[in-house]
Image (spheres, rainbow, N blue to C red):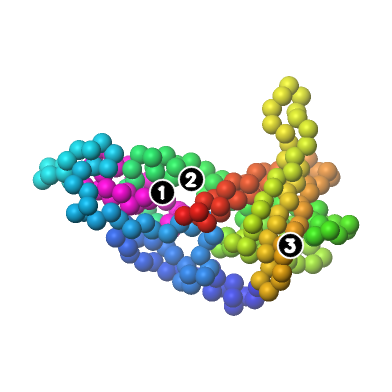
């Protein structure tokens, strides 16, 4: 990616929507693949009652729209203001109880896992059916659109074109518990090419700190894949 294209892909602008202020990419094509579109609000005339507790709206009981689902609620059922980075809101926005719970869970990804992905980790990378592996640093681009692999060669994979992410594990720790993540298999499409491409990332065995960083990156990548699939299902 050239420096000029990279600059354009990272450029953002401040816009005001009915739901609040949003910091969005200047070019829609460079939006995060984890992003969600703002929902259409249920028209006021179509919701005479709270869509959760069925309280009737009147002069004293005002209606509020959840910024995540767009449904109509009373103040009691839609009083929480929670961060919603998947819709690029600058400030926390009003959400109903169920949506606020989901947004709280997603905040862990944006506060922790995303930083791990941006920081990168070192893996042995195998492309397709090749028997040769290359040591590469793998990280997510700043605009969250590309998986960048840097070593003796350099590769970019559009995260929106990733179709399958499978975490590879081995064994179980003494005393029980979860299997240890050792690598990742990833299938993706390349524009202009037929069929699926594949790569495999394997955590090295050299240094404990490096191995731990690679494992954290794999766990973060697994959560990122879940958000990616949810965005596609929207």
- Mark 1 is surrounded, within 10 Å at the Cα level, by few (under 14), some (14 to 19) or many (20 or more) other residues, namely many
- Check disc 2 and report the residue beneath it: 107
Comes first in the chain, label 3 or label 1: 1
Q: Quadrant of residue 104?
A: top left
Q: Which mark is residue 83?
A: 1
Residue range corresponding to the magenta coloring? 63-88
Q: Tell which residue pokes out farthest to the top in this image.
A: 175
Residue 102 in sight here: yes
The residue closer to the viewer here, 104 or 170, is 170
Residue at the image point whose x is 79% and y is 49% from the top: 202
Residues at marks 2 and 3, CA–CA distance in whole angstroms: 32 Å
Residue 90 in sight here: no
Comes first in the chain, label 1 or label 2: 1
- Mark 3 is surrounded, within 10 Å at the Cα level, by few (under 14), some (14 to 19) or many (20 or more) other residues, namely some
> Quarter of the image containing the N terminus?
bottom right
**In the image, residue 65 lies in the stretch drawn in magenta:** yes
* Image position, residue 170 (x, y; %): 78, 37
Q: Which mark is residue 197?
A: 3
Q: Nearer the viewer, mark 3 or mark 1?
A: 3
Label 3 near label 2: C-beta < 8 Å?
Answer: no
Query: Helix, strand or loop at disc 2?
Result: helix
Label 2 near label 1: C-beta < 8 Å?
Answer: yes
- Looking at the image, residue 53 lies above or below residue 5: above
- Looking at the image, residue 5 lies above or below residue 159: below
């Amino acid at each position: 990616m050239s420096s000029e294209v990279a600059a354009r892909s990272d450029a953002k602008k401040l816009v005001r929507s009915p739901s609040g202020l949003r910091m969005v990419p200047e070019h829609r094509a460079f939006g995060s693949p984890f992003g969600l579109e703002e929902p259409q609000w249920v028209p006021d005339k179509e919701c005479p009652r709270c869509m959760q507790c069925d309280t009737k709206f009147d002069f004293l009981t005002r209606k509020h729209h959840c910024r995540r689902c767009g449904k109509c609620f009373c103040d009691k059922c839609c009083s929480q203001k929670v961060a919603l980075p998947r819709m690029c809101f600058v400030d926390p926005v009003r959400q109903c109880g169920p949506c606020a719970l989901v947004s709280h869970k997603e905040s862990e990804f944006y506060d922790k896992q995303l930083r791990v992905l941006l920081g990168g980790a070192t893996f042995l990378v195998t492309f397709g059916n090749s028997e040769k592996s290359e040591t590469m640093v793998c990280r997510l681009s700043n605009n969250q659109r590309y998986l960048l692999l840097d070593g003796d060669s350099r590769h970019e994979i559009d995260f929106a074109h990733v179709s399958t992410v499978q975490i590879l594990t081995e064994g179980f720790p003494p005393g029980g518990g979860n299997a240890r993540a050792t690598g990742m298999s990833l299938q993706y499409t390349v524009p202009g090419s037929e069929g699926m491409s594949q790569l495999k990332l394997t955590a090295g065995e050299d240094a404990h700190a490096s191995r731990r960083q690679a494992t954290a990156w794999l766990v973060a990548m697994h959560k990122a894949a879940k958000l990616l699939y949810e965005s596609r299902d929207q």
